[in-house]
Image: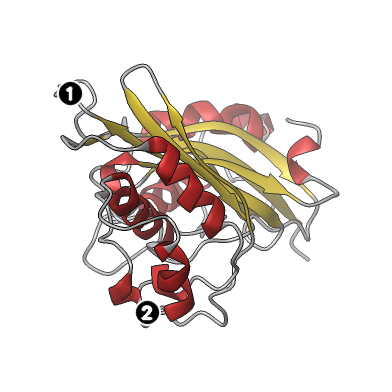
Amino acid sequence: MANIKRYFIELSYDGTRYHGWQIQPNAITVQEMLDKALSTVLRQPIQTVGCGRTDTGVHATEYFAHIDVHDAPQPPEGGVEEAVVPFPLQGVRGLNALLPHDIAVKRIFEVAPEAHARFDAVKRSYEYHIHFEKDPFRHGYSWLLRDKLDIELMNKAAAIVMEYTDFSCFSKSNTQVKTNNCKIVNARWEQTLNGIVFKISADRFLRNMVRAIVGTLIMVGRREIAPAQVRDIIESKNRSKAGTSVPACGLYLTEVKYQPPNPLKGSEI
């Protein structure tokens, strides 16, 4: 009987040239690139399971996936010495050598067989970055916005968003999810040296949800609508009532938290 071990992989990626995380036909994705590199290193077909989807062009500074590895990788002919090197010890360097510059593996560690990168995650955090003056070094990594925004009003509206759980109005249609309910535990705008950043955390997110929330809050910041009108938008459950989705370039998945027993606190190999 084959010996199967489960590993978590922590990585980060620049999503600019990818059509999101999940494998798609006729489109390059982060998962596709990682699966190919893993299959090469381990010399067996590997399919990763990610902690969630990210849309086209969205970045991740912290992302987790898990894989199941059958037995030890077999060495090529004449490569006897390589067989004694455990996968996690040579996996990070080997994977990064095969992956493109915009995907980086940070660590690989063995977890319990039942640990699951997606279903065990209890909180996910995103940031959306905006800058107000042209900056060639932020192009593609933050949204350049010319408008003046009232951050105080935007934070009043963000507090209202946190009072609700049904976010149908911020979700793409036909997403085939069982529920549009999410529990948001943090949503706030903060001033940065060169702009502003929106930080939001929840147990789960719907497709396009963060970008739609940001677009709606910007309407408040521009004084196009009052903070209280955000209630009407959410209670309408109608996507057409909410603001336009902001560009993907400013959005980052920044943190994934897991329920006890936390697989991320296990011994790293």
Q: Residue at x 79, y 36 (%)?
A: 265
Q: Which residue is mark 2?
A: 238
Q: Nearer the viewer, residue 13 or 101?
A: 13
Q: 10 Å neighbourhood of mark 2: few (<14), some, or many (≥20)?
A: some
**Image-quadrant location for residue 86:** top right
Left or right: 107, with 190 as reference point = right
**Earlier sequence position, callout 2 versus callout 1:** 1
Contact between marks 2 and 1 (CB within 8 A): the answer is no
Residue 98 point in image, percent of width and height: 37, 35
SS class of the residue under badge 1?
loop
- Which of the image's four quarters has the N terminus? bottom right
**Image-quadrant location for residue 54:** bottom left
- Which of the image's four quarters has the C terminus? top right
Q: Residue at x 23, y 61 (%)?
A: 27
Q: Amino acid at mark 2?
A: Asn
The CA span between labels 2 and 1 is 34 Å
Q: Is residue 75 visible?
A: no
Q: Which residue is mark 1?
A: 133
Q: Amino acid at mark 1?
A: Glu
Q: How many marks?
A: 2
Left or right: 96, with 57 as reference point = right
SS class of the residue under badge 2?
loop
Q: Residue at x 41, y 34 (%)?
A: 197
Residue 212 point in image, percent of width and height: 35, 60
Q: Nearer the viewer, residue 196 or 115?
A: 196
Residue 97 point in image, percent of width and height: 40, 28
